[in-house]
Amino acid sequence: MQQADQPLAVLPGDNLTVALYTMRLIIERGLKARELFLDCGLDTRLLLLHHMQISHAELIAAPTHQLSEGDAAALTELAIRRGAGVPVARLVGEAEFWSLPFHLSDDTLVPRPDSELIVEAALSRIGGEATRILDVGTGTGCLPLAILSERPRSAALGVDISQGALAVAERNAHRLDVADRFSTCLSDVYDGVPKTGVFDVILSNPPYIVSNVIDDLDTEVRDHDPRVALDGGTDGLDIYRPLVAEAAPFLAPGGYLIVEIGYDQSSSVRALMLEAGFEPELLHDLAGHPRVLIGHKSEPN
């Protein structure tokens, strides 16, 4: 039994039910100290299942399984780190997107459900055709890989300024069994894209947070997502300018440029698209916020 003056911890010999209870207390106390009041039940269960490498059904079937010293220490550490604000996805090293699992690293953002609207927009416009896709700032590769999982005749190139991110994207392509249709290259927007490459769809979820507000973001984003994948410059549009203005040579006639935007950027990015000769269409997310702009290229180069 733990003494009142001892730090709360999962102990060797505790069963899984007791471990879940203790971990939840550790997480709740840590978050409360940061003035975060969250329901930690799901987080606790995900961390325990991940570390123990068991399913939820196995947890239910063996709640009295007793923990070794190593497992008890590891579960305590996971709970402490979650209580300190580290996202669950960072702790387990992966996140779900489009109902698919994606590996993460310090070089990548955690894929977010709102970005699935890009995938929906692309799928609805390419139909079942054999489509060539370019993803600028691919990160985990979640956008093009989700599309390839649905369109077996399509192929994609993912580009990023981070070699580490490209390695993660390649790993995810192998994990999802689409590596034969997915390639990568190091590129700052289009700088490294082969000049002979012409694509039917260009996707991007670029950095779009204004530099001086990054420090005000939620701690899970500010302290754990790579800043280079967040920082859009003084007005949040640093990447959109070349992304939109220089897209034409890489986009086939009738092709689409599909980008995620910040909630207050629809007018600015729409203006960039109109100036570049695109016909823009705005999509809203489930919360009603502007989320995706689609530029349609109707005229030949």
Image (tube, rainbow, N blue to C red):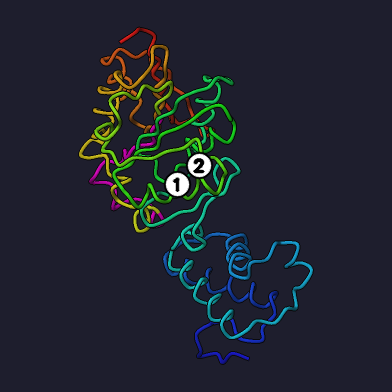
Work out which residue is located at the far left of the displayed protein and give it.
Answer: 234
Q: Position of residue 220 (x, y in %)?
A: 41, 56
Residue pointed to by mark 1: 170
Location of residue 117 with respect to 109 vertically, above or below: above
Q: What secondary structure is marked by label 1? A: helix
Q: Secondary structure at mark 2?
A: helix
Residue 229 x %, y %? 32, 46
> In the drawing, does residue 156 fall left or right of residue 3?
left
Please state the horizontal and vertical placement of residue 150, each as a whole percent of the image: 59, 32
**Residue drawn at 50 percent across, 85 percent down:** 7
Q: Quadrant of residue 40?
A: bottom right
Q: From where the camera sits, is residue 199 visible?
A: yes
Q: Quadrant of the C terminus?
A: top left
The magenta-colored residue range is 203-220
Q: Residue shown at 30%/14% (left/top)? A: 274
Type of amino acid under label 1: Glu
The residue that mark 2 highlights is 179
Residue at the (51%, 71%) spot, across then down: 78
Instruction: State how far apart marks 2 and 1 are (Cα).
Output: 7 Å
Q: Is residue 32 visible in the rendered structure shown here?
A: no
- Tell me the crowding category of disc 2: few under 14, some 14 to 19, or many 20 or more residues within 10 angstroms, Cα based: some
Determine contact: label 2, label 1, CB under 8 Å: yes
Neighbor class of circle 1 (other Cα within 10 Å; few <14, some 14-19, many 20+) is many
